[in-house]
Amino acid sequence: MTPTNDSVVQTQVAKAESAQGGGDAVASPSPARGHARRRWALRTEIAFLAGPALLVFLTFVILPVIIAAYYGFFSWSGYGPATDFVGLRNYVVILQDEAFQAALRHNAIIVVLSLVIQGPIALGLALLLNRKMRFQSGLRVLIFAPYVISEVVVGTGWSLILASNGALNGLLDKLGLAGLQQDWLSNPSLAIWTLMAIITWKYIGFAVILFLAGLQGIPEEILEAAAIDGASYWQIQRRITLPLMGPTLRIWAFLSIIGSLQLFDLVYIVWGQYVAETAGTSTMATYMVSSGRNAGSYGYGNAVAVVIFLISLAVALLYQRFVLRRDTEGAVTGGNDN
């Protein structure tokens, strides 16, 4: 073989080795390429699972808010296209209206009283029902039953019971306690407490069931170890149960706050659009309906809806930032588990 032929053979061998090496690279992808492939697979999975829910949320929550914000800039009666552009006038009127300020104040009172009244009562009932006792299941059903009853039925029933000539005043008269008869619905000094009694009766069952779920998630071994060490029942509840119930209590408080800010149906059914304002039980939602739809001013009503949304959003974000963050931080892995 001549030197020239040797050179050609060596070149072909080098090309073959190079081609073989490239094939090995394809067969064995680098760690960086494999990591990128898993990352894209994870993103595709998240998009597939969260995409439908995100689409529904954008369609039925965000889009209506955008439309309401658009009509809030017009003086619109609800018929035909909105052409009378008024800018921020509706929003200025809302913030300066004493009726809206009173409704906002009532909402704030309901938020505070809901947390102060419902929380301890529900926690006490949950601790009671978490112990072994007779008729435990029946008591749980009875406590939770008001929550599943329609607000219309609840509102209508309580409006008949608490009317001036209703069942409660009639019962007090039969018992010889006529001096305790009150105008439970129309007296401004009593109406807000009447509303809180109805709300507590209606929604206490949900809080009890939520707290029971939290209590049953506490390991029995911890409670038994504390009892063996000599801790009393109340020391166990205060030192162990309540701290471990923290995430459940915070979630319930968040749901209670948002529900109180959006309260409408019970107030509207029991007091109506006119009595609620004079009785001191009007809320932002009842103000929106009475000043918007019932007054034939849909542009103004849309502006009120936007204000309610912004207030609820601000409260939710602040609560998430300063209260719920400690609970959600432990649930986020950051994708570093691999």
Image (cartoon, grey):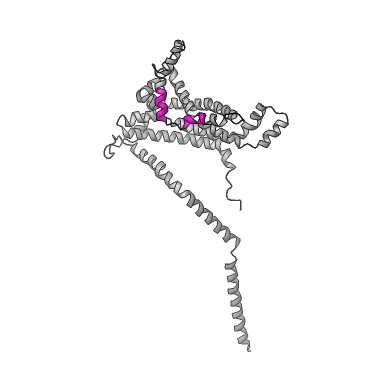
Q: In this view, does 208 lie to the left or right of 102?
A: right
Q: Is residue 51 left or right of residue 139?
A: left
For the question of whether residue 34 can be seen, the reply is yes
| Residue 308: quarter of image | top left
Q: Does the magenta stretch include residue 243?
A: no
* Furthest residue toward right: 229
Q: Toward the viewer: 191 or 12? A: 191
Q: In this view, does 224 lie to the left or right of 26?
A: right
Residue 95 x, y percent position in the rendering: 39, 29
Q: Toward the viewer: 197 or 166? A: 166
Q: What span is colored magenta in the figure?
A: 141-159
- Dominant secondary structure, magenta: helix
| Residue 32: quarter of image | bottom right
For the question of whether residue 264 can be seen, the reply is no
Residue drawn at point x = 36 percent, y = 38 percent: 68
Looking at the rendering, in which quadrant would you find the N terminus?
bottom right
